[in-house]
Image (tube, rainbow, N blue to C red):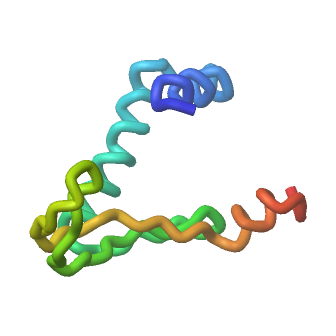
Amino acid sequence: MIRSELIQKLSEENPHLYQRDVERIVNAIFEEIIDALSNGDRVELRGFGAFSVKKRDSRTGRNPRTGESVEVDEKHVPFFKAGKLLRDRLNGHGG
């Protein structure tokens, strides 16, 4: 599902809301999650999961094409851990 499909589905399920308002809400939610992660905060959505940021240390890597050693800088990557409700639904329990 892509963002526009999510907005469309939410609009259909909430006919009392204008689609442009649903779009603003969805975008605001994503922006808040991005801002929190950018600040190093964790975002937990109970039953769904938690977003956090993990630090990857700098290291020596290899260029797979040439086999040449390359230095890879330290970086921060987003991480998602599914909540119990989501895991249960994926495995056919509950729902």
- Residue 71 in percent (x, y) is at 10, 69
The quarter of the picture where residue 70 lies is bottom left
The quarter of the picture where residue 33 lies is bottom left
The quarter of the rendered structure image containing the C terminus is: bottom right
Q: Is residue 50 left or right of residue 95?
A: left
Residue 1 vs 19, above or below: the answer is below
State whether residue 28 appears in this view: yes
- Residue 62 in percent (x, y) is at 23, 64
Residue 31 vs 7, above or below: the answer is below
Residue at 25%, 76% in the rendered image? 56
Residue 40 vs 48, above or below: the answer is below
State whether residue 16 appears in this view: no
The quarter of the rendered structure image containing the N terminus is: top right
- Residue 34 in percent (x, y) is at 28, 55
Q: In front here: 42 or 82?
A: 82
Residue at 61%, 62% in the rendered image? 48
Q: Is residue 94 left or right of residue 57?
A: right
- Residue 72 in percent (x, y) is at 14, 68
Residue at 29%, 55% in the rendered image? 64
Q: In front here: 5 or 92?
A: 92
The quarter of the picture where residue 73 lies is bottom left
